[in-house]
Structure formats: structure tokens, C-alpha cells
Image (tube, rainbow, N blue to C red):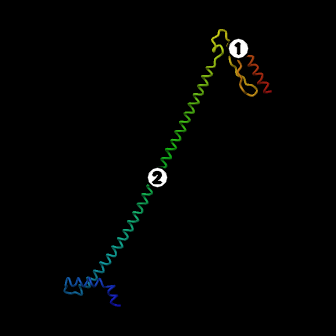
Amino acid sequence: MESQYLKRCLGSCLIKGLAEVVEHRPADPIEYLAHWIYNYRRILDEEQKRRLERTELEQEQEAALTELKMLEKMKEEELTIQQKLEEERQEQMEREREELELQRIEKEQADKWLLQQKDQEGQEKTIAELTDRFGAPNLTRVEELDENGQSEFLQMSDPAATALVSLLCDYKKVATIC
């Protein structure tokens, strides 16, 4: 049992120390072995300390790598978010351009329609202007609203008739109000 203890605790140390004593053959082998064992213990402590430092360093490196990966992921996510925001902004600008273009087209169409209406009003001609016959009546158009609010076109041949119709229209309006 004691030999087991000595093998386990001092085995490698004593074997290496005695080998050094045999190799160097000092004048005082006991003192040499004592210094060698003391130095051996210091070397073991330093190696253990270096192993601990190396382990800590490896852990720190792993933590730094993990942090670096997280930073890269965050940068990728930030870039992705910026790209999505840019795409949304571009889509919004495109929608606004399309809306402005539609408004412009609608305005142009409304302007064209108004011009056509003005041209039609200007192109309405009297019967005398439309025919080449000599002595055709020169009738003007008068718009009159019936009881339903729909317009009727009356054609007048002379200014007296036009005045009579306007008096009748005024009379109808007064009668409707009363």
C-alpha cells in the first residue's frame, strides 16, 4: 500500500530526479536531488498556471469569436433592414409618381374635354350658317328648362320672339316661386 502511494505521488518525480543525479554525478547528491525536486515543483506549478492561462485565453477567444459572429449577424440584419426600408421608400416614391402621373393625365383629359366643349359651343351654327340657301332664317338657340329641370332648345327667328320667350321664362320662374 505504501509503495502504491509512493508510486502515485513521487514516482515520476523521483525517477526523473535520480536519473539527473546519475547523469550529472554531483559531489553532494542529496542536496542536488533536494534542489532538483524543489525546482521540479516550481516548474509543475508554472506549467499548471500556463495551462490555466491557456484555457482562459481559449475561452476568451471563443467568447470574442462568438461576439464577432453576433456583430456580423447584427450588421447583416441592419443591412437587410436598410435595404428593405430603401425598397419601401422606392416603392412609395413610385406610387407617388404614378399618382401624380394619373392626376396629370386626368387634368389633361379634363382640359381637353373643356376645350372640346368650348369648341362645340363655338361650332354651333345657325341654320343660315349651315345652309347655302339664300334667305334661310337666322335662328338663334335658347335654352329653356321644363318642369322636370331638363333643357329644351327653342329656336327664335327674330329679336322680338326672343324677348317674348325670355318674358315667359321670367313669368314661369315667378309663378313657380309663388
- In the rendered image, the quadrant that contains the N terminus is bottom left
Is the residue marked by circle 1 packed among few (<14), some (14-19), or many (20+) residues within 10 Å?
Answer: few
Is the residue marked by circle 2 packed among few (<14), some (14-19), or many (20+) residues within 10 Å?
Answer: few
Which disc number belongs to residue 80?
Answer: 2
Q: Amino acid at mark 2?
A: Thr
Query: In which quarter of the view is residue 162 placed?
Result: top right
The answer to whether mark 1 and mark 2 are in CB contact below 8 A is no
Residue at far bottom of view: 1
Is 167 situated left or right of 88 in this image?
A: right
Residue toward you, 83 or 38: 83
Residue drawn at x 32%, y 75% as measured from the top left:
47
- In the rendered image, the quadrant that contains the C terminus is top right
Is 27 situated left or right of 94 in this image?
A: left
First in sequence: mark 1 vs mark 2: 2
Mark 1 — residue?
Answer: 157
Q: Position of residue 62 (x, y in %)?
A: 39, 66
Q: Position of residue 78 (x, y in %)?
A: 46, 54
